[in-house]
Amino acid sequence: MAKRLRCPNCTRNIVGHEPNGCVLEALMSVLRDRGDHTERKLRSIWANVDADRLWNALGPIVDDLGEGVFTS
């Protein structure tokens, strides 16, 4: 039996993962929409994300958003 791949951010199954506020799912949707990777590659990328490292990188962007840096 194949191992079920789980989202490292919210622990839901990657296959059939519905939008639920999971930031990693949203980012993976952007990658999917770009069309640069096969579905198999996307699932591999997703399953192997270090969620703590991702959030450490996203933290400053979220801070800037809260401070209005992206406001036009």
Image (cartoon, grey):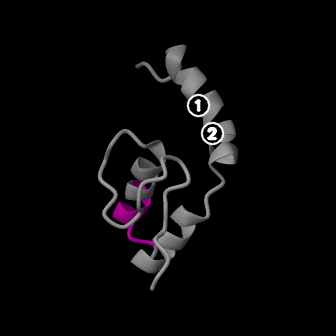
The mark found on residue 36 in the picture is: none
Residue 5 percent coordinates (x, y): 48, 68
The quadrant of the image that shows the C terminus is: top left
Which residue is under mark 2? 55
What's the amino acid at mark 1? Ile
Which residue is farthest top?
A: 67
Q: For marks 1 and 2, give the one nearer the viewer.
A: 2
The quadrant of the image that shows the N terminus is: bottom left
Q: Is residue 35 magenta?
A: yes
| Above or below: residue 5 compared with residue 65 | below
Residue 26 percent coordinates (x, y): 40, 48
| Distance Cα–Cα, label 1 vs label 2 | 10 Å
The majority secondary structure of the magenta stretch comes to helix
Residue 9 percent coordinates (x, y): 53, 48
| Above or below: residue 2 compared with residue 16 | below
| Above or below: residue 9 compared with residue 38 | above
- The range drawn in magenta is 30-36
Relative placement, left or right, of 1 versus 69 is left
What's the amino acid at mark 2? Trp
Relative placement, left or right, of 16 versus 42 is left
Q: Residue at x 45, y 79 (%)?
A: 40
Residue 34 percent coordinates (x, y): 39, 64
Q: Residue at x 61, y 37 (%)?
A: 58
Q: Secondary structure at mark 1?
A: helix
Which residue is farthest bottom?
A: 1
Q: Secondary structure at mark 2?
A: helix
First in sequence, mark 1 or 2: give its number. 2
Relative placement, left or right, of 52 versus 15 is right
Quarter of the image where one finds residue 33: bottom left
Q: Is residue 71 magenta?
A: no
The mark found on residue 61 in the picture is: 1
